[in-house]
Amino acid sequence: MAEPALSSVRLYRMETPEHACPWGRRALQLLRAEGIPFEDRPLRSQAEVEAFKHAHGVTTTPQVFAGVERIGGYSELAKRLGVAAETAEVSYAPVIAVFLSAVLINLALGGGIRSFMGLAICLLAMLKLMDIAAFAASFRKYDLLTKRWQVWGKLYPGVELLVGLGMLRHAEAMGLDALVGVTALVLGVMGMVSVGKAVFVDHLALNCACVGGNSRTPLGVVSFAENLIMGLMGLAMLIPSGMAQASGGAL
């Protein structure tokens, strides 16, 4: 038996200055493509999103209602309409390429863990520098400092490159190790907090800007781990014993 036609349809989706939910936009496009009259009710702030979730007992947006019936999100809407739901395009290829290249270059040079991290950070910075505007726009969606001070998104790739070069330089005699270590630690902690809030608290479906602004690498555990490793490397550089091990240990 065919499903009854939908009526009195309302679409609730996240649409803030920082983030437009891609699944909300897919639901919007699907309703328009199917010629279904509906009310678009965007949620303009994180506070509105959280209030909506609490009021309706849901954990995610978008949500589609037909009268008093809650249909659900984009996938449930597509199933109800009998159409194939789109899936997110995901690729970890840039992350794999960066770290595999760093491993191979480091092995060829006979470097240790510190050299490997320096190479990896420099390669990540290079990808960001290829399109700074795209990186900054993507980074601003979840980085807490960039949301408050937008110029940080454009400065970050250069700072990251300097950190990577500092790890490669082994500049203890120049007194730069402490500065590089503190910077790496701060960047790592800031990154973990920003990614953790976006993914585990706000449940945002975003792409990670760590490999450039045009990537399809999802923001998640991998992004959190990258920042964790940077923070730990920075901490190791501030501890004499840890610094020696990081400088001389074989990969």
Image (tube, grey):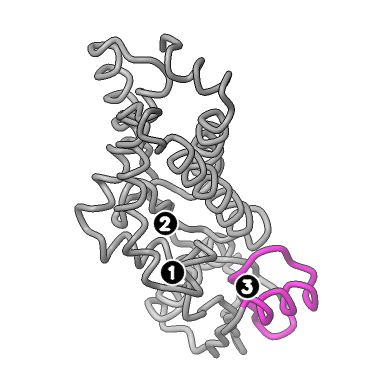
Q: Is residue 56 left or right of residue 93?
A: right
Say which amino acid is labelled 2. Glu
Say which amino acid is labelled 3. Gln
Q: Which residues are magenta?
A: 46-68
Tell me the residue that label 2 is attached to.
86
Residue 214: x, y in percent? 29, 55
The relative height of residue 24 versus residue 206 in the rendered view (above or below) is below
Tell me the residue that label 1 is attached to.
26
Residue 212 magenta-drawn? no
Q: What is the number of the mark on residue 63?
A: 3
Q: What is the number of the mark on residue 102?
A: none
Of residues 164 and 50, the one nearer the viewer is 164
Q: Earlier in the sequence, mark 1 or mark 3?
A: 1
Quarter location, residue 251:
top left
Say which amino acid is labelled 1. Arg
- Does dot 2 land on a helix, a strand or a loop? loop
Of residues 233 and 135, the one nearer the viewer is 233
Whether residues under marks 1 and 2 lie with C-beta atoms below 8 angstroms apart, the answer is yes
The crowding category of the residue bearing disc 2, from other C-alpha atoms within 10 Å (few below 14, some 14 to 19, many at least 20), is few
Quarter location, residue 55:
bottom right
Residue 140: x, y in percent? 43, 67
Of residues 29 and 217, the one nearer the viewer is 217
Q: Disc 1 versus disc 3: distance between alpha carbons?
A: 12 Å
Q: What residue do we see at 62% from left, 52% from top?
A: 196
Residue 155: x, y in percent? 33, 61
Which quarter of the rendering shows the N terminus?
A: bottom right
